Amino acid sequence: MKADRSMISSFIKPIMESLIAVAIGVLIGAIVLKFSGYSPIKAYVALVKGAVGSAYGWSMTLSAATPIILTALTFAISARTGIFNIGAEGTVYFGAIAAIVFTNMFANPIWGLIGGIMAGILWALPAALLKVYRGVHEVISTIMLNWIAFFTALYLVLGPLANPNDPNKTLEVPASARLPLLMRGSELSLAFIIAIAAAIITYYILWHTVLGFELRASGYNERAARYGGINPKKAIIWSFLIGGIMSGIAGATEVMGRPPSYAISQGMANIYGYGFDGIGVSLVGRNHPIGIIFSGIFFGALKAGATYMQIDAGVPLEMVKVVQGIIVVAVAVPGLWDLVKKVVRR
Amino acid sequence: MEEVPIIEMKGIVKIYPDGTKALKGVDFSVKKGEIHGLLGENGAGKTTLMKILSGMLPPTEGKIYVNGREVRFKSPADALANGIGMVHQHFTLVEVFDALHNIILGMEGHGLFSKIDVDKARAKLQKLMDELNFQVPLEVPVETLPVGVQQRIEILKVLYRNVDVLILDEPTAVLTPIEVKELFDVLRKLKEQGKTIIFISHKLREVMEITDRVTVLRKGEVIGTVNTNEATPQLLARMMVGRDVVLRIQKPPKEPGEPILRVENLWVKGDRGEDAVKGLSFEVRAGEIFGIAGVEGNGQTELIEAITGLRKIEKGRVILNGKDITGRPPKELYNLGVAHIPEDRTHMGLILDMTVAENSILGLHWNAKFTGALNSIKWNTVKAYAQELIEKFEIVAPGVDAPVKSLSGGNQQKLIVAREVSKNPELIVASQPTRGVDVASTEYIRNYLVKLRNENKAVLLVSADLDEVLQLSDRMAIMYEGQFVGIVKPEEVTEEQIGLMMGGIKDES
Amino acid sequence: MKKSVLALFLIGVLAFSVVASGCIGGEKTTTPQTTEEKPQYAGKIAIVYDVGGRGDLSFNDMAYLGASRAAKDFNLELKEVQSKQESDYLPNLRTLAQSGEYTIIIAVGFMMTDAIKQVADEFPNQKFAIIDGYVPDKPNVMSILFKENEGSALVGALAGLIAANDGKDKVGAVLGIEIPVLYKFEGGYRFGVAWAEDYYKKKTGKDVDIQVLYTYTGSFTDPAKGKTAAQAQLGQGAWVIYQIAGAVGLGVFDAVGEYLQSQGKEFGPPFAIGVDSAQDWIKPGVIIASMMKRVDVGVYKAVEAAVKGTFKGGIVELGLADGGVGVSTIDDVKAMFNSLPEDVKKKKLEELGFKSEDELFAKLEETRKQVPDWIWQAVDELKQKILSGEIVVPKAMNKEQIEAIRNAKSWQEMEELAKQWESSS
């Protein structure tokens, strides 16, 4: 059929673009390494070996990918609805807090996830309602809500939820409410499976349900959506809510299924930054849930490989960061390009 | 005495990149110190001609002479240097700047650090305003000023650049009657000072009132130039709309049935908050095509959007089959049997980035026919349905999974028509259904609208194409400034009468 | 066309800023010398820094100082590993432990406590040490803690006496994220200020009531926050400001420095007080002294124990008596400054506008002379009393305890609290 060719090319094109971008990034990174006096080959071998060269490497890669896949879904579903929701960061905090509270009340992982989901919904609502009823731009509101979340969470972590036995963190998720590890002596837990499932569900919602149709229609063209009997306000609220759920789950699984802490560290050190990483993951994955699975694993591999690049290849962390930054920027350019074009066109 | 015209355009041809032939060899000349009207319907080529004269567009062919000297404009700056400036229909002001800075914008000098001599500019402007007896506040952000004042700023902006020939594109379209009167006073004053003015309009009364001579354009050609004092509105109207009928649509006589749509005293505001629809009442009956003609921008868009639930209704009622549907959302209207072919297919009727299949169910995607468990969409059913539409309506598309933007304009429009009429509606609201559509598709769509009427549906047709309204309508209204100048039967009026009504004049005879 | 140029430009700017920030980050901490030519090779040790990383001119750099000195003394190869974020701790430690090559692995920072516990269980034959982390019950983990409350009491006394002597009634503290570790600092500082009030009254007969302004900035990394907080405190009349906030403190120094500049003064008061390392050299004339937390001493002791076979799991707490904390002396500053790589030293001197190190140290001497001798002697007197056990400095470990100290009226009252807490724990 004629249609097949265009379908295949619409899948292949972004993949090819991304692969070329990776190659360019790797090349520039190699040049930088060379000029800084390190062996690019040794460094990249260590990176690959550390990330995917062993079962433990894989476990680090996949566990690092878990939270950022989820936060990327938050960004992606909103981007598909024409919204730039960068509130994943704050939602992660509350998801984690809710999971800690719920699992300490009911020592069962299901309750932890429910807590994360509820926190995600509740914390998505303010930005959604402000957008729909007051026309507050979501970038502004979500940035401010991130700060509100940060300081509120800081207070909760320090005060009501402080761990009486260890002042450096909150109450722990009880052993019976932790997500089982998929591999002994690793950080890889059921959380990864949950993240993959979430991506697949997001894909299904967006492309196989009436709701998803309405979200995407609103995202592409609000006027046409309105003409098509769709209420864009409703679409916006739904996209915030589903996105919130994803980040809420990210926070919950991070404390329920990521050794060693099973708690929130002081200053939120162990759950900080995933919301922002998610934006990059989503852009590289072209805001497509399936693309996000791969780009999330790619980002995870970069994180996991960083350890080996330091220890095996003796490349200092700063240089590792520079090289990884170059690769990430190169990979993000195609997605970013699309996004910028869209913004400029408005 | 043979006076050299200040402006002379000879054999101007303009073909746009998409192949549209906007001007087909136009000769146009303007005498120094006159107010010259340029009259014509939408798409007659008035604006294109003037954009060429003001250096915004290059002509495909033809020559331009200023004071007998041949010129070639590469940009509006070249035209300004030759004393020709244009005030556009859509203002080009920086809203947060005050009038003074808007007027001197672009004249600051070209160095990165050139100093702007604001005081000198202010003094020069004040002198200009005093001479014209025409004041605008110079220090207030223009966004806070009324439209009429903003327009004066636009005019001042051009005069400040020392032009001799001032082109005004539909200057009265956005003005209140009092503002129109004030504008005319200013134009007369400018004429006294020896300026030449080209006044683009489709409003007969205004053209009769203000101009010395009128050139009428129709479909890219000059029909003629007349002295205004020798012309009558009737003559101008005939020149403007007189035409050969290109297509013939077979339309058997039919007795209309019950009223399907009833509109009572409808008031709707436009995007800028002005009253766009002013107390309209009419009905559309089963088995009838009710056409609305008129120059675009007279409230048709707002009327249609209000009826189809896309725009807020300020006052009045819309009744469908005896049920009050005022202010109901589109989804509800569709479920009650309303179909809508919108005027803007690329921004409203279709989502260009989505596929043919996805677009084929826009506005009925919730229909039980296409949905399964958990509100999922049954894509196989949808694709089969889209394929069916493609075949039945002879739409040329690479496939149901191709993005709709890969279709030609005519086929995009056919897809919309196919989708809307396949809803089996009671009322079809068709707005500019054949605009930008090739001849074959146009005929197909027109015949389909007649077919629906023959099947006893109610059709509300809005079109800027007078032929279309004349041919298709059983009854037609001519809309002017938010109201109907009259409701007539096409076969009972002359083109001259319609032309007058489109220009806002009701012929009482 | 134009739009695509704009889009391209935006991407270019973005890409540049990312890469540039990476490069600047990379430039900040020049490559550490990981291996040194040694006649006899006695094995390897590893040190894992926390997210603050090398180049913080404080905590992590002090740890490096201790580790490198130990490596030199005992002929060891030193492997340094940095951490980008908290989730890196476990993989970093585990990867090192898996290799089995290291005599001891040192984790710098309390944030690695959970990771150390886990890895210690997984690798029972590997020796670990953690700085600032409380791990009392693992036979293969040496947990090195500091009595920051004691050191903070000394700089509190210094601050309080400088203010009292100039007839001022406010001193300040700018802190990082509100975590319990910082309560030890804040409590000790308050104790020192209260002790200064009493001392001053005894000496001059004048009653003084010095208020402690304190701000938790919510960050350890954003100097702008420290600057804003310090500016606010200066505006309220704070005469000496103690920074307990890592890199945020650099902003505190800036704020005090700019304030002095605006008054046309080369030297304080008002002064700032540094923390963790001898930070005095960072802004001569502005920083009167630093509360040193001798992380280097802790790291060195751990390595020494592992090499000499005296390693034992459990808590090692270093206070004034062990040289673990203290007020910086000029010699300390010299040692700290000389631990910087040569090129960094040269650059810093240039930035500060000195031709030579001697000029810098002369300026530091001069700074200290702004404070009368009797104040320095008083601080030393407090130190002796703490060492002898005559005075006990309270150690606030949680919100409740810090509140009790904040509400206490005198140092005696605070000491009473200290004794209560000690007997109950």
Image: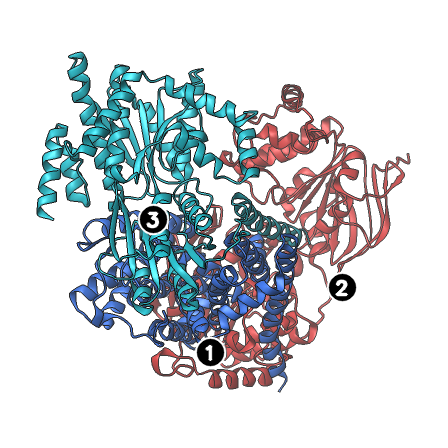
Chain colours: A blue, B red, C cyan
Marks 1/3: CA distance? 84 Å
Nearer-the-camera pick, A205 or A66: A66
Q: Which residue is mark 3?
A: C301
Chain name for mark 3: C
Percent of width and height locating residue C92:
42, 61
Tell me the crowding category of disc 1: few under 14, some 14 to 19, or many 20 or more residues within 10 angstroms, Cα based. some
Type of amino acid under label 3: Lys
Count of numbered tags: 3
Percent of width and height locating residue B90:
61, 45
Tell me the crowding category of disc 2: few under 14, some 14 to 19, or many 20 or more residues within 10 angstroms, Cα based. few
Residue depicted at x 59% and y 72%: A15
Q: Residue C90 occupies which quadrant of the picture? A: bottom left
Disc assigned to residue B19: 2
Disc assigned to residue A68: none
Chain name for mark 1: B
Type of amino acid under label 2: Gly
Q: Look at the image and tell me in which quarter the N terminus of chain B lies.
A: top right
Percent of width and height locating residue B266:
41, 56
